[in-house]
Amino acid sequence: ERKEVKVGEYNAVEDKLEIINNSIRFQGLEPPKDKTIIQEELRKISLPLYSILSALTILGMIMASAFLFFNIKNRNQKLIKMSSPYMNNLIILGGMLSYASIFLFGLDGSFVSEKTFETLCTVRTWILTVGYTTAFGAMFAKTWRVHAIFKNVKMKKKIIKDQKLLVIVGGMLLIDLCILICWQVVDPLRRTVEKYNMEPDPAGRDISIRPILEHCENTHMTIWLGIVYAYKGLLMLFGCFLAWETRNVSIPKYIGMSVYNVGIMCIIGAAVSFLTRDQPNVQFCIVALVIIFCSTITLCLVFVPKLITLRTNPDAATQNRRFQFTQNQKKEDSKTSTSVTSVNQASTSRLEGLQSENHRLRMKITELDKDLEEVTMQLQDTPEKTTYIKQNHHQDLNDILSIRNFTDSKDGEKAILKNHLDQNPPAQWGSSDPSRTSKDPIEDINSPEHIQRRLSLQLPILHHAYLPSIGGVDASCASPCVSPSASPRHRHVPPSFRVMVSGL
């Protein structure tokens, strides 16, 4: 009837409850609660979801085992040998470890105890990290080898064996082990419980539901995750770079696609799993699907083409790969020959220019020789006027001797000039009236200023003409005074003038 009925009194001083009417009966099995009952409820992974994803994981592991059997059985086939069977085994092993981590991620407090769950936190982290590094490291090493062979000309003929690739993968695993060991010793993962806001009971009971969620965390979780993500991220970026650099090489095409697949799926999985942290079913579904798709696509890209090719026509596959390698090698050789041809053409054009310049200088020397012969003949016709030249140009002869030394003449010619100076010292030479020569046009032509000017023009040209490296003649073979047009009277030139001319 919705009206108040007094059933008793409570004495707060004596802390005593007195029931007045014992005939009152409450609805239900017990009296109503004097406060809201809060009941904690663990958010757990749905069993049907865990069963479905576990079944897909088992199928993936069976497929990986089949690929491993195929790789081991046909390891002596040329097609399998060319693809590094040991590295393929590592890819399969890494995929199987990644598959196994899905079972551990689905186990929570509804399946295992709190102590077991805390142990699983460490185990699943180690398995997923080692599995990822093993599979991706093997693909990274194979891509690096192709990049080293096809992009580096110096290493073109160098063979990079599988042992070196195993060392690369081992180095990556060693870095992972160092990080994981330090993580486990310094700040191990522990089970933590996160409580959420209360929710009404879906069944309509007079209680409130407080959801709780189990996590694997530690004190400095952000720092450790940052270290792992930074290392894996740099490795992934470098692997994608190598795959992009070798995109035009047909042999590692599927390996490059596998690297892209792993990189994209890992980025998506890490981001979405972080955003769905408070929804365990969604988080587990995304993480499991990313691992399944990533591992399955990678294994199929690596082994399915080999399986199809080996079953259809193994000899043609080997020849096709050899032909592709030969074609790439021919392209590199054509580029090298083109560069060498351009260098040879540049050298040839430069040599032709030097030879033409040398020919021009030699023609200039011939013209100057003719002028010199004319001057010599004029001096022979006027012997009485040469006394003045002898007397005033002893220093010029010394200059000619020093210039002759500069132009690398023979020692015999220098000895003739010295002998001439010793036999005919300046004191024994005649003298003439300088006033007469200054007025004679012939003497004016042979004045000291004119002779010195002609020497200053002729000697540098002669010096450059005696360079055999550009097609010139040797100084010992040169005879500036000999010319087909020379007059027969040139043979009777006095010794002093012959010495002077040969000195040039």
Image: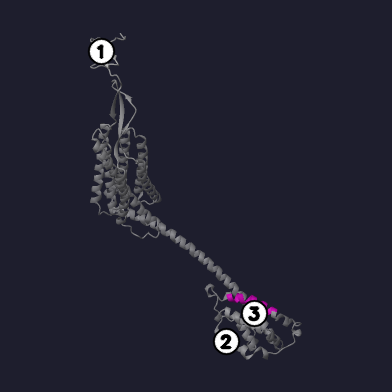
Q: Helix or strand or loop: what does disc 2 sit on?
A: helix
Q: In the drawing, what numbered circle is on residue 415? A: 2
Disc 2 packing (10 Å; few <14; some 14–19; many ≥20): few
Query: Can residue 251 be seen here?
Result: no
Say which of 55 and 348 sits in front. 55
* Residue position marked by numbered label 1 in the rendering: 18
- Give the amino acid type for the residue marked by disc 2 in the picture: Ala
Disc 1 packing (10 Å; few <14; some 14–19; many ≥20): few
Question: What stretch of residues is rendered in magenta?
Answer: 449-463
Residue 408 drawn at (x, y percent): 56, 79
Say which of 310 and 277 sits in front. 277
Which of the marked residues, 2 or 3, is nearer the chain's N terminus?
A: 3
- Give the amino acid type for the residue marked by disc 1 in the picture: Glu
- Give the amino acid type for the residue marked by disc 3 in the picture: Lys
Query: Can residue 203 be seen here?
Result: yes
Dominant SS type (magenta) = helix
